[in-house]
Structure formats: C-alpha cells, structure tokens
Image (spheres, coloured by chain):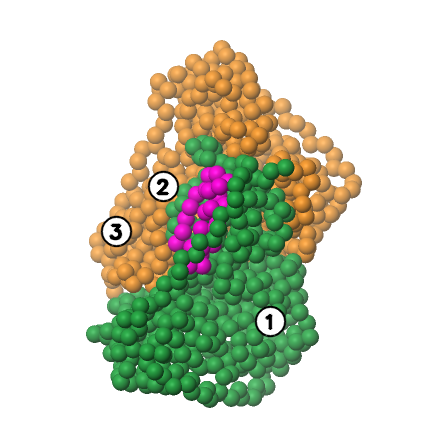
Chain colours: A green, B orange
Amino acid sequence: MGRNGAEFALEAARAAGVEVCFANPGTTEMDLVVALDKVPEIRSVLCLFEGVATGAADGYGRIAGKPALTLLHLGPGFANGIANLHNARRAGSPVLNLIGDHATWHLAADAPLTSDIKSLAASVSQFVRRSATPVEFARDLVDGVAAATGSPSGVASLIVAQEAAWEDAEGELPDLEMAAAVAAEPAAVAEAASRLRGKGAQAGLLLGGMLDGEALEAAARIRASTGCQVWLDTFVPRLREGRGIPHFDAVPYFPEQAMETLAGVESLVFVGTRSPVAFFGYRSVGRSSLLPEGCETLGLSGPGQRPGPDLLALAEALETGPAPGVADAPLGPVAEGAIDVVSLGLILAHWLPEEAILVNEAATSGLGWGLYGRSAAPHDVLSLTGGAIGQGIPNALGAAVAAPDRRVVALQADGSGLYTLQGLWTMAREELDVTVIVCANRAYRILQAELGRTGPAEPGPVAQAMTDLSRPVIEWTRLAEGMGVASCQVSQNRELQAALEARRAERGPYLIEVLL
Amino acid sequence: MGRNGAEFALEAARAAGVEVCFANPGTTEMDLVVALDKVPEIRSVLCLFEGVATGAADGYGRIAGKPALTLLHLGPGFANGIANLHNARRAGSPVLNLIGDHATWHLAADAPLTSDIKSLAASVSQFVRRSATPVEFARDLVDGVAAATGSPSGVASLIVAQEAAWEDAEGELPDLEMAAAVAAEPAAVAEAASRLRGKGAQAGLLLGGMLDGEALEAAARIRASTGCQVWLDTFVPRLREGRGIPHFDAVPYFPEQAMETLAGVESLVFVGTRSPVAFFGYRSVGRSSLLPEGCETLGLSGPGQRPGPDLLALAEALETGPAPGVADAPLGPVAEGAIDVVSLGLILAHWLPEEAILVNEAATSGLGWGLYGRSAAPHDVLSLTGGAIGQGIPNALGAAVAAPDRRVVALQADGSGLYTLQGLWTMAREELDVTVIVCANRAYRILQAELGRTGPAEPGPVAQAMTDLSRPVIEWTRLAEGMGVASCQVSQNRELQAALEARRAERGPYLIEVLL
C-alpha cells in the first residue's frame, strides 16, 4: 500500500530531525493524526489549548535548538496560539507550525471555519507557505525546518491544504538544505573591537539571544580586557546562570531606570540583539530609545542570531587574556517568617538542582530570583521575551520534553499563569518533571505599578478592581488537582523549603502555590 | 480640570448606548482603565483571558442587540480573543473591540509587544480603524457602534494609540449616525414569493441569523400557505424555541445527511443566511454545496442581517393566513439509570425555566437536547456559529450580564470548555446566574467520529490518544472550585434531576459535571 501526503511529509520531517509534535488537532488534521502512527519516532504530545502547544514548542526550541512541530486547526485554532508564537518570534526560537486548512476546492465556499490564515500566520512567522500537494507539503516542511533553524532562527508556518495530506505521495524525500549561518564579517568585528578598545566604561556591550557559558565567558574576557560595560537585554530568551558563570546586569525594565543605567555610554556594540528601546512609550518619557543622545551603535548580530560566535571573534580581535575568575556572591541564610518576593528567590536559589531549567514568568514576584539566581547552582533561564503573558507553564512543558534528564522549574506569576493553565494537564499526562511555583499575590501587580506611574494618585474603585484577582480567591491547588497535578499551598519560608526539599526524591509534575 | 481622550471617548460610547466593557487590560490601556471610573454607567467586567472577554461580548451582543466593549492589550492580547470573535463574526453579533496600542511615536521602535494589529483585527472585523487623537477616538468609537449594529451587524475593532487616550480632549461628543437598515426590495420579495408559491415541497426556505418568535411564526405561515419546506441553518446564532413556538429542523451537520435532507428541493430561498455549504470538505463527498445540482437559489438577506422583516414581508406577499397552531411534542418520563446524551436532553428540557437562555456548545453530547429542546418551556438558544470552540462558557457569561433576570444555562462539552474555563471566575466575581452543565465524556468525541469517517478502520494508538481526555481524568468540580464556583458531579439521571431542582431556589453560578 502506498503512503499518503501526510505520511510522506511526516517522514520528511523526521528525516530533517523533527522529534516532537505538540498537537491540538481538529477535523482538517485527521489525516495527519492518522499518519502520526506511521512515524512513531515523532513523539505526539496532546495539548488542551493551542497556546499551550505553541508555548511548549517555544520552550522546546530554546532548549533543543531545533523545532518541534505544532499541529493546529485552521485560522481560529492558530489564532489561539499567536500570543506564544509572538514570544517565540521575539526569542528567535525555532518553531514549525502545521496548520490544517480546508481542501483547496472548499475554500471558495467560505465555510464556517474559513478565515484569512495567511495574514494571521504572517504576523508571527518569518516563513509562511501553503502546501497543496504531497510533494509541496514534504518540500515545504523541510524548508520550514531550515527556515526555523536558520539565522535568524524563528517561527515557520505551513498551511496544509487537506488534499496535500490525503492524496497519494510519490517520490524521494526532500533533503534538508540549511543555509550557512551568517556570522559577522571580520571587518565589522574589527570595527566593533576598535569601538570598545581603550574607551573604558564609556563603551558598552549589549548581549541578547541564546547565551551559553562560552558566550558569557567571552563577554567577561572582553570586559576584563577593555573595561567596557556589559549588559544583558531586559529579557533574554535563554541565559546560562549560576555559580562560576560570568554575570552581567540586565537593562532595567522601566525606561527611566534603564536610561540612568545607560547614561554614560558613548558607544554601544550589540550582539544577538538590537539597540535597546523601552518596552512601552510613556508620556512622561517621550522617547523610545534608551540610549543617551549621540551614542554610537554598532550591531554584529541581531535578534534570532547566535551571539556566541561573534563574541568569540570579538574577544579574539581584542586579544583578550583568559577569563577572569568569577567571585560568586554568597547565599545568605533564610530567615523564619512569611514568604516575600525576596525570600522566595533566596530559597529557590538555595534549592535549585544543578543543570535545572528555570522558566521565569514571575513578573514582579521575580525580584528575589533576580537577586539570587546568579548564586544558585549552574542552570539555564528562559524568560518572557515578547511580553505576551501565558508563556511560563507551556515553556516549562516544552523544556521538559526537550530535556527529560533535567529538573524544570516554572517560576510563575498567578495572573499570567491563568492564560495557559491547561498546560498542567499535559505535564501530568506526559509525567514531565516540572515544579510549578505559582507566586500568588492575587493581583495584576505590574498593572498596579503602571497605574501608579500613569494614573491619578489614588486610582478609583473600578481601576483598582481591574487589577485585583482576590475576589473570589483563585485556588491554584484545586486547579492543579483538577488537571491531574499534585500540589500544596505554602505561606511560610520553612514550608516552602520543606516542599522543595521533598521534591528532591520525587519526579513528575508538582505545583506549589506560594502565598505572597 | 479638563478630560482626556479616554474619558471623552468613553463618554461618547455611553451616549451611543454602550453599557458594558469586558476587560483584560494591560499597560497601554491604563488611561482607559482610569477613565472607566469617570463613566460609571459603563459596567466594567474583568476577565482573566481575552477569549473570555470576546466570547462574553458575543453572548452579550446576541441578547442585548447592541455591542459591549472589549478592552484588549495590543496584538497578542487581541489574538487571544480572535477565536471567539470569529464566532461573533459568523453570528453577526455586535461587538466593539478597543485594542490599546503603543503611542504612535513608539511604533517605529518595534518594541517587544509590537505586532501587526491591523492584519489581526481585519481577519475578524468588518470595521477597523486606528485612532490617534482624542477627537478621532470618540468619533471612531461611535462609528464603531454604528458599524457593529448595522446591517449586516458584526465585529468592529478600534486600535487606540496611547496618545489618543492620554491627550486632553476638546469639543462636543459625536452623534451616533446609524445607516438605515437595508431590507430586501419589494421586487426581490415578490420574486421570492413566486419561487415558493405553488411548488409545494419542491421549494425550500432556509432561515439563519437572530430568529425570534415573530420571524418563526412568519415562516410557519409561509409553510402552511405554500407547502414549502423550511429548514434552519445547522448553527443559528440565536433561536427562539420551546412549547408553542414553530419548530423547524436544522440542516444536518454531516454533508451526506444534509444532502439527503435537501435532495428534493428545486428552488431555495434563504433569509438571514446564504446558500448552504458543508462545514468541512470531505474527500468522499468532493463538493461544498449541500444543494442538489440545478437547484435555484435566491437570498433576501444574508448573514448578519435580521431575517424577521424579510420573513414578514414574504408572508404578506404570499397572503398567508394566520399562523397554524403548534402541536407540541410531549416530554416523556425520565427513566432510572445512568445519564446518557438522550436522557441528559430530556431532563434538561423538563427542568428548563421559562425565558431561560441556553448556550449550546455540547457538540456530540447535545443529541438529546436537539430532540427535546423544542418541548421545553419557551427559551432562547445561542449556538456555536463559527466552529471555533471555547464559546460556551464566555457566551453564557455575556448573556447573563445582558439579561440579569433570566436563567442562563451553558450546555458545555468538556473538550471545548477547557479552552476558556477562566470564564468561570468572572461568573463567580459578578455573581452571575449561570448553570454550567459540563458533558464529561472525556474525549474529543467529534474527532473520534471524524477519525472513523476518514481514517482506517482501526485508528492506531497515537491517533486514539490524540482524541482521548481520560488520562489523567480532568476533575471539573475541582476546576470550578478553584475558580470560585460551587459544583457537583452526577452520573445518574435522578442525581442530575435533583441537582437541577436544587438550582430553582438558588441564584448565582453553579457547575454540574455530568459523567457520560
């Protein structure tokens, strides 16, 4: 018996290195679902909501360095996944979406689920194709792998006409043709080196993208050799962190503080990112750039491009010495008493197992982690890159699929966690080793801060109500149990310590609701 | 003290009849949030997820006949609301989205949350504007009300630059300028009458849109006078139903059955809808239209247009007699034993209070309701019009806000309910009188049926797993309690009867998980 387009294309994906499919399929994807049984090397992970599938693919992509598939249903199903694809796009995370569309002959009928999928996909994708035959489908899928993992890496989306899946397929599987990675030209590296050399703290180096230990060591050597300042993007998609690993401060979130931090810099070189801009445009600030007037900028690589090679080349051009030793900040003792955002970070840093992956969507509750994360055992941190909340639980799910031997921790604000809480169920179903720490301040605390910045001295009752999650209380332990995940609630430092210590002997998903 | 653009525009909205705002705001909407306190006539309802806000606005619009505002955050926040806006679009439901955008001068910075909002909005909206000054904002908001409630009615989206909200506003509030409703021309009505007259059952009349008792009575008179066949769209946005109300069969969901139903018709007139097409294009069917070859069609009004006036005009042109009496089908007794999809519908029809609003997203579990709903006390039904699942809980929420004196029941499939379960929290917060009946078959049962239609005789384990929600079990009673909604679980007919009877003396939200 011959194979159909769905089977043929999934075979091509497997041959191109795809190992996972985060799926939330519908009727137009049934041929693909049937074909998944024929390609068992691709692990199928069912999600209850598309935003979970896309956020999981983002987390997977950041850790695995290659795309998982998502399997999504037409325009509305894809739309449910856009917010987390927006984060993936901003992270340069490799993701490959399969969007099952109507058969081509059915499009003109404008059936109830028909919509403009191409425009939706283009809003978050650097590669969009519509495949209408089995041969196109396999070819486009392999090209999509190449596009997602290219330079810049990012989101690729394939709109699959139903007949491309159900028709018989003939021919050879297409080859994966990867474009050679684009690294900065030697002349650009030399120019960047000249901008940093001999300027001391008037020169700055801004780092973004997927930052591993090697890239950070190169940056530390450059700093030691030139005396330049080094900063990280406010939100870095993947960051190596912990004892023995060079640490650099991030550009602060609020523009006033960011501009104060960057005030003295006359020349900025950036790698794996771009010239820094404010997250939001505030009336009181009146400008987007965070750099002082007249500051020169030079980018060696942009968002979605790997910063490591450029940093190594730059360190070489500067003839730096070996990396200086890292003086680790000690972790102080944890006091008795109620948990606050500072003690939360301290306790977590004490406990965090080596080689853990920490997904940070803690927002305002992440203050303590920001202070103490650098003093924990070596680990990787994934952050909210695009500001589209609801990334944490799905990212953690995907990271756990990518790295089954590593502990995954989701440090999760309660407000944003509610956007994609359905991811808990998939953690239970797949028995993933994720510890979800919900920071329950029962408010949109960041919006309360924003109200204080932009609104009247005393917001009215409606404005206060629009940032308040305490009425009724959201019981995260019940939500977790409803999704099949065991849980506990803690409010005291020693309770949190005990709950985390108990996790050392356990694997699998668990949720700790921390009352703040 | 002067007012700013946000306050000015909300005043204009209030003057244009807007009474409710379903909000899930972020930083770019803070001036609007502050202004909500200045316009207390607009009720602000906080939602935990944008798809809840847009689905609530859809349910509100179907019942109130005018738009609620939604308040959504930039492109990713809006994207989370697209699926339920797709349903609203297909329903012709009036909805007016306010999407807070960056300040205009901040757009070029391509800040992390920047995306192509216009393309996203255009995919579901019949009116899209970007307002960059207070005067534009107020004018566009009032024009948006007119567009949402025009003919066709539907979704209007306003992208609000931050400066349009924060700048000082001067001048008079703009007037609401409603275009006169477009009704069918007398010549078209006469032509439709001639197509129905004297053809008996070879002529057909297809009804869609917001169908009230008067519209259905006119259709019943037309049928009695001409002998034509009358059908409803498979999914009608709002349908009057129950004892004493003319009942018509809907076009079946699966195309083979639909084509069999429509096989004998030689001429079809449609009102408030369009020529019927299959929901999906099946390889085995090979065509989109559900009508027999050669069938003539004539549309008096399309989707989003009110069918009532055209039906009355058509009845008049046909000089029909008074509406025939309706022979109500009796409701049989409920047997002992376990609940199944048939007994579920029977029990619900027995219990349903007069003037209830039933939101039907039961999918395959709605079979019994489809049999017995017509025999319940008079009520209105809202259905899933666009196929984008996750509509039920939010629609019920919005309907309850629109009609606080009516009982609202959400007959909810479990798989689709998980897309927007966060709506339960808003029901609790606003103390809305909604009874959510979750039909827990713990499967994507419709996809199991589709697998059986398109796949192999025996789907493989992966395909089976992708439609299975039983591992782990989702405990809806825990989820409800986590969101602040009281609940129970039932599996026996008498348990369901008792749980429903107990509701008669209670108001407020309650969830009944029905094990099927």
Give amino acid for label 1.
Answer: Arg
Farthest residue to the top: give it.
B198
Number of residue marks: 3
Q: CA distance from mark 2 to mark 1?
A: 48 Å
Q: CA distance from mark 3 to mark 1?
A: 52 Å
The C terminus of chain A - image quarter = bottom right
Verify CB contact (< 8 Å) between mark 3 and mark 1: no
In the image, the segment drawn in magenta is A126-150
> Do marks 2 and 1 share a subunit?
no
In-image side of B443 versus A50 (left or right): right
Q: Which residue is mark 3?
A: B136
Residue B500 location, x and y as percent? 67, 46
Q: Which residue is mark 1?
A: A407
A139 in the magenta segment: yes
- Kind of element beneath mark 3: helix
Give whichever of A490, B355 is nearer the camera.
A490
The N terminus of chain A - image quarter = top right
